[in-house]
Amino acid sequence: MLRLRAWFALVVAALVIGAITLASDPQATATAPRIPTKATAQAELNALTVAPEGSTSGYSRDKFPHWDTVSGSCNAREQVLKRDGIDVAVNGDCYPTSGRWYSPYDGVTVHSPSDVDIDHVVPLAEAWRSGASSWSDAKRREFANDLYWPQLRAASSASNRAKGDRDPASWKPRSAYHCTYAKMWIRTKYQWELTVQSAEKTELQRMVNTC
């Protein structure tokens, strides 16, 4: 009985230590900037223009040039890898040589930068269908490299490629991230004055309601 109690105490202690380590893990704070509060996201969602989605006629990723150099030798992709990563070390070209990246879309931690994608929260093709087709090349470049608003987020390659260019009416991250994802999506569409289609807005409202 005493041996069993000692074993149980060790298990409890290990769980407590693990919980403390998890709570202090930088993955809890590494995130995109300027994510709105629930109240602000709701107001911005209410203000979005609802319109039928346009076509992808004429669309090309080349019309959204990325990744621009933004600081020293660091381009926008590398800046996000540093911002969203944990214990990231980079070489003289700003490319990560070590670190890990927590992907909130699927709850996976990735240990190689080659397995990390920088997700455009509002995909480039979705932006094109929502109003960006009429933008200048310069404005589309700014959008594709937007580090100011929560439009860029490190995610596992698997989750980013599963998402593709779909909006929240047809693709969502794991349920624990619905609130944050919706707030990032809404903030991006609001700040860039992009439209939403009816089904997209309905799903965004449902996701905001989980906050």
Image (cartoon, rainbow, N blue to C red):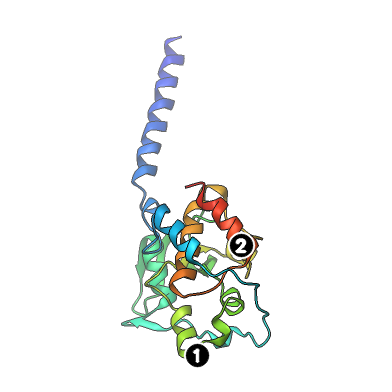
Q: What's the amino acid at mark 1? A: Asp
Query: With respect to residue 135, does 10 lie above or below?
Result: above
* Crowding near the residue tagged with mark 1, few <14, some 14–19, many ≥20 C-alpha atoms within 10 Å: some
**Residue nearest the viewer, comparing 111 with 104:** 104
**Residue nearest the viewer, comparing 176 with 98:** 176
Dot 1 lies on which element? Answer: helix
Count of numbered labels shown in the rendering: 2
Q: Residue 78 appears at what percent x and percent y?
A: 41, 74
Please name the residue that numbered disc 1 is placed on: 137
Q: Residue 162 appears at what percent x and percent y?
A: 64, 63
Considering only order in the chain, which callout, 1 or 2, is on the residue closer to the N terminus?
Answer: 1
* Crowding near the residue tagged with mark 2, few <14, some 14–19, many ≥20 C-alpha atoms within 10 Å: some
Query: With respect to residue 27, does 147 lie above or below?
Result: below
Query: With respect to residue 128, does 163 lie above or below?
Result: above
**Distance (Cα) linking label 2 and label 1:** 26 Å
At horizontal 39% and vertical 73% (from top left) the residue drawn is: 147
Left or right of 96: which side holds 160? Answer: right
Q: What's the amino acid at mark 2? A: Glu
Q: Residue 85 appears at what percent x and percent y?
A: 40, 61
Left or right of 126: which side holds 151? Answer: left
Q: Residue 175 appears at what percent x and percent y?
A: 56, 48
At horizontal 61% and vertical 65% (from top left) the residue drawn is: 167
Dot 2 lies on which element? Answer: helix
At horizontal 45% and vertical 89% (from top left) the residue drawn is: 138
At horizontal 58% and vertical 61% (from top left) the residue drawn is: 201
Please name the residue that numbered disc 2 is placed on: 200
